[in-house]
Structure formats: C-alpha cells, structure tokens
Image (cartoon, rainbow, N blue to C red):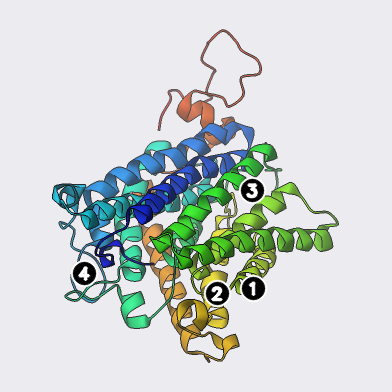
Amino acid sequence: MIHASTVATPDTGDTAWLLTSAALVLLMVPGLALFYGGMVRVKSVLNMMMMVFGALAVVMVVWLLLGYSLAFGHDLGHGLIGDPTQYAGFSSLVDAQDGAAYEEMVFAAFQGLFAAITVGLIAGAIADRARFGTWMVFSGLWTLLVYAPVAHWIFYLGDSSHAGGWLVDKVGALDFAGGTAVEINSGAAGFAAAIVLGKRIGFGKDPMKPHNLTLTMIGAGLLWFGWFGFNAGSALAANHTAAIVFVNTLMAGCAGLLAWSLVERVRDGHATSFGAASGVVAGLVAITPSCGSVSPIGATLVGTVAGAVCAVAVGWKHHFGYDDSLDVVGVHLVGGLVGMTLIGLLANADVVGVDGLFYGGGLDQLWRQVVAALVTFAFSGLMTAALVRILDTTMGFRVHADDESLGVDLVIHAEAAYDLHPTGGARPHLGPGSGTLHF
C-alpha cells in the first residue's frame, strides 16, 4: 500500500478517487450487514446487522481519537507501533494548510473504514450468541490492541527519519490491501472468539440454515462493488496500478464464484446461490493482498484456488468441532492465507518489481509471505482469545441460554425482523432468562 504522505503535491483527481474509494468501502458495511443478515436464522437478523453497524460507529470514533496514530503515526521503535499522540483527534490534519495534509485526512478516514469492516467481519463468527454491549466494548478495544498494531506492521512505510512497520520493512512481505491486517486478522480473531464463547445451542444437531438468501446475494453484490474501492483505492491515485488492481479484483471474484460452484456441483450434485455468493467473497478475500502483485491471469488463478479451497474449508468446523457461525474462518482466514501465500508463487516483476517462484524468483518472496501470514494469525488469535475471555469474565459476553433459544433480536433489541403477525404493540414475553431487555 502506498502511504499518502509519500505524495508531495496530491492531484485533485487522485484525491477525488480516494474520496470515492472511501465511500465505496463505507458501502461495504451495509453490504456486509445484508450478507451476514441473510445467513443467520430469522431470530438473529437485526442483531447481526446491528453488530456490523455498531462496529462501524465504535471503530471510527476510536480511530479518530487514537487508532490512526497507533497504526500510521511515526514508528516508536522496531516497527511495532506508531506514536499514539501524533494524529490524536486528527487535530494535526485539520490545522495543516497544504494540499498534502488534506489528502492525509482522506487517507485517515479511508483507513479507518478498513478497520471498521475488519471488526464487522469478526461478528459473523459469533452470531446468535453475543451480548451487544460487550460486543461494542470489544470492537473498540480490539481495534486498538490488535488491528492498529498489525496495520502498522504491514501498512506503515515510514519516511527518511522513521523506519516502517517490521513486516514490510524488515521481513519484506507484500500485502497491497489487507490480506494480513484485514483478512487473516479477522479470520483468526473470529476463530479465537468462537472457541472461547463456545458453540451455539444445537450446533451440529439442529438445522441452522440461512433464512434469506436473497439478502445474502444482494449483500455479496454490494460487497463486490465496494471492494473496488477497497483494493483499487489502495493505490491512492487514479493511475496504472489502480487500473491493474481493478481488473484483478474483478477477475478474482468471477473465478472464485466459478470454482466454488464447480466444487459444489461435483461434491453435492448442485451449485447453490449461497455457494456462489461465498465463492465471490472467497476470491475477493484472496486477491486483496495480491491484487497489486499479480497479472490478470494470476488474479484469475488466485480466485480459482481460493474458491475451491474455501469451499472445502467451510466444512472443517463440523470436523474439528468449532462453531464459526458464518464461515469467517473458512472464507476470510483461509482465503487470506491463500492470497498471501500465492504472492510468493505468482508475483510478477512487471507488476510489482518482484518475481515469485513460478516466474523464476525462487523461494525468496514465498518465505516472507508465509512469515507475515503466520505471525498475524498467531498474534490476532492469542490477543483475541485473551480479550474475549477477560470481557466474558468481567461483563459477560455470551447471552443466557434461554435468551439464545428465544432469539437475540427480541431479547437484546425488543424487535423482530419480520413483523408478520402484529399484536398491537405489546412486548413479547422474553422467557425465564430474560426478565428484562439487556445488552
């Protein structure tokens, strides 16, 4: 990723592209809410959507106050974390008068939306069983303790007086738009949170099918649309790199859909809309880190591999016994690992200046990609497990069993997604575990 501060005199067209890209990433939030909302059971739809929108609100406030400084402030040493005071409240960006500072303001908002969508992704792993208030606290703390450090490691390029993040500066890993900070980070966090909170009641016994695949398909379409801002916007300019990334993002999504559908057809005898939507997302996840490193043919291969591998990986939760409600592990963790690793194989010097193994570059870039992926997985998983355990002990993270059975929409929000039988406004009985509404 190109850091905004490396651009001395930003072009108004480039600034307009970055503003547009930020808006496209924001559109991914309702896209994710619809995508996840259609995948849960009818009694959890509104809660799922609220977790995604709630994460946006909390993360952006935290990002303004401290998160951006930790991620993109001048490195405090060893490429681990940024100066927490440098951009606190964005005050230094507001006071600056030159054009470069204005672009940095847009860049700061753009990156904050990356953080927001990352936290929103985690929600899918713990659907149906989390307290909303605790989730909101988790969202803010996780942004500061997990997301901001990883973003600094891989995105912060430094300047003449400050070294960059250690994964990019010392390891030399390539990650154009967030295979580590966004995809592996959210996948590992979702995996850890699902294990600590435990399985949903009836997991592996009761049918827990998506209640509205129309919503899921619409959400997948909005996510795909927004992903062009996510990836191509990370070029921070309306240039040749953005054009390549745009095409690569398109091709990977198409290839992911085809590969997932083919796996379903061979394995199950039919291709499903649910699989098609998931395949698109799997391809997009994998191309996120590699979109600035591979050719369009390489992007098609990345999407194909991700679609096929993730179609298999979503079944691992039943084999290994962890309850990742909406396949955050199978799609985002596995897809992120695939995308990061394939850079080491498919990187093209004509695109990024580095050749991967298949282009004669040997294993040099491959080991760098693997190190970055594994470090992110370990850090995010361990930190998230500790954070969820602490919050569950102090605040209570999982809802009462009776409340879970009744449905978190009614218990937490006193609402139902579909009011098919209006009763004149009387509040429903909430069961023995829910004498009052709660977060």
Cα gap from disc 2 to disc 4, whole angstroms: 29 Å
Left-right relation of 38 to 137: right
Q: Quadrant of the N terminus?
A: bottom left
Q: Mark 3 = which residue?
A: 203
Which is closer to the viewer, label 3 or label 4? 4
| CB under 8 Å between discs 2 and 1 | yes
Q: On screen, 136 above or below 164? A: above
Residue 315 in view here:
no
Mark sitting earlier along the chain (2/4): 4
| CB under 8 Å between discs 3 and 1 | no
The residue located at (44%, 38%) in the rendering is 53
Mark sitting earlier along the chain (3/1): 3
Task: Describe the element under mark 4 as helix, strand or loop.
Answer: loop
Q: x%, y% of residue 189?
A: 45, 58
Task: Describe the element under mark 1 as helix, strand or loop.
Answer: helix
The three-letter amino acid code for the residue at tag 4 is: Asp
The three-letter amino acid code for the residue at tag 2 is: Val
Residue 233 in view here:
yes
Q: On screen, 182 above or below 373? A: above
Q: x%, y% of residue 105?
A: 26, 51
Mark sitting earlier along the chain (1/4): 4
Cα gap from disc 3 to disc 4, whole angstroms: 45 Å
The residue located at (75%, 58%) in the rendering is 261
Q: Mark 2 = which residue?
A: 294
Q: On screen, 244 above or below 85? A: below
